[in-house]
Image (cartoon, rainbow, N blue to C red):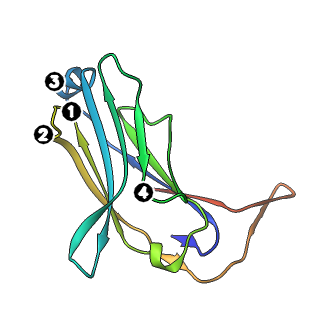
Amino acid sequence: MARKGHDVALTWRYSLSAEEQTKSQTYFLVKWTKFNPSSSAYDLVALRSKQTGMPPSYSEQDPRIVVDRATGTSFSSLQINDVRIDDERIYKIEISVEFPGTVIAADHEANLTVSGKTNLIKKKGKMNNLYYCSF
């Protein structure tokens, strides 16, 4: 659940087998997509990839979307800033540990619901508009 105009962090937790953990040291790809009701397909939202000998690379398809740079091999997080009603969709994460990304180690979906209300939560005297959702 997110509020329109606020930020939301979608976090997926997963576990890799011992073999998948070993493979992830050589190649690791996290792909975030969201369901497009017009095409009945999933559209790319963001990517995080890591290959041996190279720094991690990140690709976000919308400037309001930020991939958590601390993403590890047990969780992945995607932040949507300034949530809009049209962000309300099913989001999917796929984790691949073998090039070219054909072996899926994890595949999870989450449904983001957006509320039109714009009330802020007051916490310890400060206004806090970051909502955290864990799936």
In the picture as drawn, the residue positioned furthest to the left comes out as 102
Q: Alpha-carbon neighbours of circle 2 within 10 Å: few (<14), some, or many (≥20)? A: few
Quick check: marks 4 and 2 in contact, CB under 8 Å?
A: no
Camera-nearest residue between 58 and 12: 58
Is residue 52 placed above or below 125 in the rendered structure? Answer: above
Q: Nearer the viewer, mark 1 or mark 4?
A: 4
Q: Quadrant of the C terminus?
A: bottom left
- Read off the residue under disc 3: 19
- Read off the residue under disc 1: 97
Residue drawn 38% across and 73% down? Answer: 89
2 or 3: tag closer to the N-terminus: 3
- The amino acid type of the residue labelled 3 equals Glu
- The amino acid type of the residue labelled 1 equals Val
- Read off the residue under disc 4: 61
- The amino acid type of the residue labelled 2 equals Val
Quick check: marks 2 and 3 in contact, CB under 8 Å?
A: no
Residue drawn 51% across and 70% down? Answer: 1
Camera-nearest residue between 64 and 35: 64
- Label 2 to label 3: alpha-carbon separation: 12 Å
Q: Alpha-carbon neighbours of circle 3 within 10 Å: few (<14), some, or many (≥20)? A: few
- Label 3 to label 4: alpha-carbon separation: 31 Å
Residue drawn 40% across and 34% down? Answer: 57
x%, y% of residue 46? 38, 51
- The amino acid type of the residue labelled 4 equals Gln
3 or 4: tag closer to the N-terminus: 3
Asked which secondary structure carries label 3, the reply is helix
4 or 2: tag closer to the N-terminus: 4
Asked which secondary structure carries label 1, the reply is loop
Q: Nearer the viewer, mark 1 or mark 3?
A: 1
Quarter of the figure with residue 120? bottom right
